[in-house]
Amino acid sequence: MPGTHIRPFLPALQRLRCSSAKMPIPPAIFTPDISTPSDSPYPSPLRQTLGQTAQYIRTSTPPPLIAPEPKVPPPTTVVEASKRLAAWTAVDRHVLPEYKVIGIGSGSTVPYVVERIEQQGRERNKDRVFIPTSFQSKELIVSHGLLLGDVDQYPVIDVTIDGADEVDETLNCIKGGGACHLREKVLAEAADTFIVVADYRKDSDVLGKNFKQGVPIEVAQFAYAKVLQNVHLIGSPEARLRMAKAKAGPVVTDNGNFVIDAPFPEEMMREPYTLLTRLKMLTGVVEVGLFCHMAKAAYFGNQDGSVTVKWHDGRIESVDSGSSLVPKPAHKVALQESTVAEP
Ligand SMILES: O=C[C@H](O)[C@H](O)[C@H](O)COP(=O)(O)O
């Protein structure tokens, strides 16, 4: 009943009224309006579900969906153009029409992957779901109008395409330069096919030769000092906590953890799987940015406009895009469709 909660105070209020007839008592004191408003005070959500276009609730005219153009700026350097070449070639060969669950990696090469997938068209993408490995790739998926899912809904993925910091001759990779390697490894493992895309600088014989900052190790925050000490003892005296560039303090991953960068001597990097298992055994380590025996193929865009494809079984293939990589408008760097089938 309205006003019952003020009953204990009524005598005092009545005395107040009598003693000061002129003093106005705000009506809200006697009739407070505590009813639930019939209209939600929050804006209506815009929902998009599998196979549907966005439904606009309670708006007579939907706001226009004008995508910023272009979503991925055209490459202006040879390195960028070679990233795009690798990404587009890999998408053309591995994101097959029948694939419905697709993992999207992270880093500066992956925007070209998403760009090429979008170019496959609405019809092919409308019943696909895309699983991100980071905040960055989630944004890419959403901004390209693709349907977002998560690995807990889709633990089996048809193909995951991702970048790498360095790739050795047997397709072991260093990943995690962008601190995304935990989710990336989960999606690489969940995928039937894991494909790496990179520019020519990442192609290496031994890990650590080109990517000097060390193996990224994601660690629980509270455990970092102990893990760091153990990583020093294992053989990386230069290992250090990764510090943020535009924030005071350390980098914090999408999972709320810290990252240690640990450069190891070449003899240890020649046995990346052994190193990976030793690091993973350290209590407090969440994931190590060494991806061993995971990739089926690695695509490297080259300066001359060709793509080197290294396969897990040791085959090396060269795909010629038919154009040099002096940056040109998108349609001029279009790639030849692949004629080589997956083994
Ligand atoms: O954490 C970041 C990821 O592992 C990236 O895939 C990796 O750093 C390569 O990125 P980019 O394509 O920018 O060289």
Image (cartoon, grey):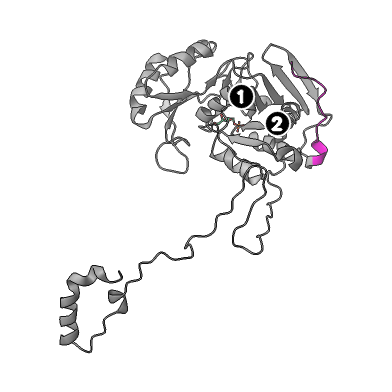
Side of 326 where 53 appears, left or right: left
Asked if residue 69 shows in the view, the reply is yes
Q: Compare marks 2 and 1 and give the one earlier in the sequence.
A: 2
**Callout 2: SS:** helix
What is the tally of numbered marks visible in this picture? Answer: 2
Residue drawn 64% across and 34% down? 110
**Extreme residue toward the bottom, this view:** 22
**Extreme residue toward the front, this view:** 1
Picture quadrant where residue 191 is located: top right
Q: Amino acid at mark 1?
A: Ala
Residue drawn 53% across and 24% down? 212
Q: In the picture, which quadrant includes the C terminus?
A: top right
Label 2 environment density (alpha carbons within 10 Å; few <14, some 14–19, many ≥20): many
Q: Which of the two marks, 2 or 1, is nearer to us in this view?
A: 1
Residue 246 at x, y = what percent?
47, 43
Query: What residue is pinned by disc 1?
Result: 191
Q: Is residue 334 magenta?
A: yes
* Range covered by the magenta-colored residues: 331-343
Side of 186 where 28 appears, left or right: left
**Closer to us: 121 or 143:** 121
Residue 132 at x, y = what percent?
58, 35
Look at the picture and state if 3 lies above or below 317.
Answer: below
Q: In the picture, which quadrant includes the N terminus?
A: bottom left
Report the predominant secondary structure element of the magenta stretch.
Answer: loop
Q: Amino acid at mark 2?
A: Ala
**Closer to us: 37 or 250:** 37
Ligand 1, what quadrant?
A: top right
Side of 327 where 50 appears, left or right: left
Residue 302 at x, y = what percent?
73, 26
Query: What residue is pinned by disc 2?
Result: 87
Residue 244 at x, y = what percent?
45, 38
Picture quadrant where residue 49 is located: top right
